[in-house]
Image (tube, grey):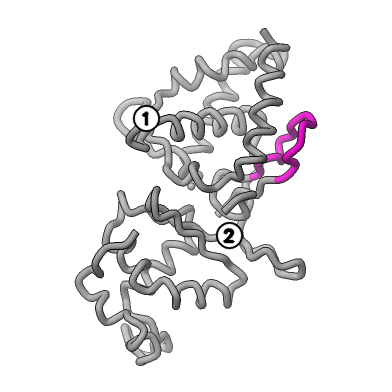
Amino acid sequence: MTEPSATGAGPARPRPTDLRSARPGRPAGSGTTSAPSGAENGADGDAGAGVRLWPGDHGTLPAPARLALARLVRGPYLAAESDQDTWRALLTNEDVVRERLADQYLDLVVDADAQVAFVRDVPAQDAPQVVRELTLTFLDTALLLHLRALLLDSADARVAISRDEAADHLGMYRRRGGGSPMDFTRQLDATWARLIESGMLEPLSGDRCVVSPVLRTVFGADQVAALSAEYARLAKESA
């Protein structure tokens, strides 16, 4: 989906900050095709050749590599499915892109199987926090866990879900909030909109969305297991 920091991977009751962001940023856990037209000039030999794209340009990377770098910094992630040319440019220029990101205290994560890439803060104690975080609510986290499980269970790694289907799953937590059905509907609307804005859900037609493949990578397995167990317990208490 520049955002998630995942902390608190224990059996304790989840707080809104357990998965603090729906954009890949500081997750708990962390393919190759031919270069696109023009990317051939972005190989190592041209990385420092002083490619000028506009008057007064001080950059040294070729245009495709710069675009990949900019897309990663802007976030929430870069996916081959939606931008094949920029994805190929990233793979062709991966080493130099990593160097430029490291200069900004950013680490590049590339999932070759899911064909997605994103940046996160470097794991250095004194490094500044560069990636913006977005606080998630209880329902946000519950839905993200559900979406990730659907994605991992999918044979073709592509999952679509409707708002009503999300409501059916999250309905098990409705009594936990103690509010009215209208309150729950407003909370669900906010969750749905937040995950779309963060890039974790990509709108299709109607009220259906595709689940971002980055959810396979962005959260650590140990943390997800602990949170899933706790949310399952809370769902039973709310039944």
The majority secondary structure of the magenta stretch comes to: loop
The mark found on residue 120 in the picture is 2
Mark closest to the chain's N terminus, 2 or 1: 2
Image position, residue 39 (x, y; %): 27, 74
**In this rendering, is residue 7 above or below 171?**
below
**In this rendering, is residue 211 above or below 179?**
below
Question: Which quadrant, please, contains the C terminus?
Answer: top right
Name which quarter of the figure residue 131 lies in: bottom right
Three-letter amino acid code at the position of disc 1: Ala
Q: Considering the numbered disc 2 on the image, is that residue within a helix, a strand or a loop?
A: strand
Image position, residue 76 (x, y; %): 48, 53
From this viewpoint, which residue is outermost toward the top? 239
Image position, residue 236 (x, y; %): 68, 12
According to the image, label 1 marks what residue? 160
**In this rendering, is residue 171 above or below 79?**
above
Magenta extent: 7-20
Tally of numbered discs: 2
The residue that appears at 62% across and 62% down in the rendered structure is 121
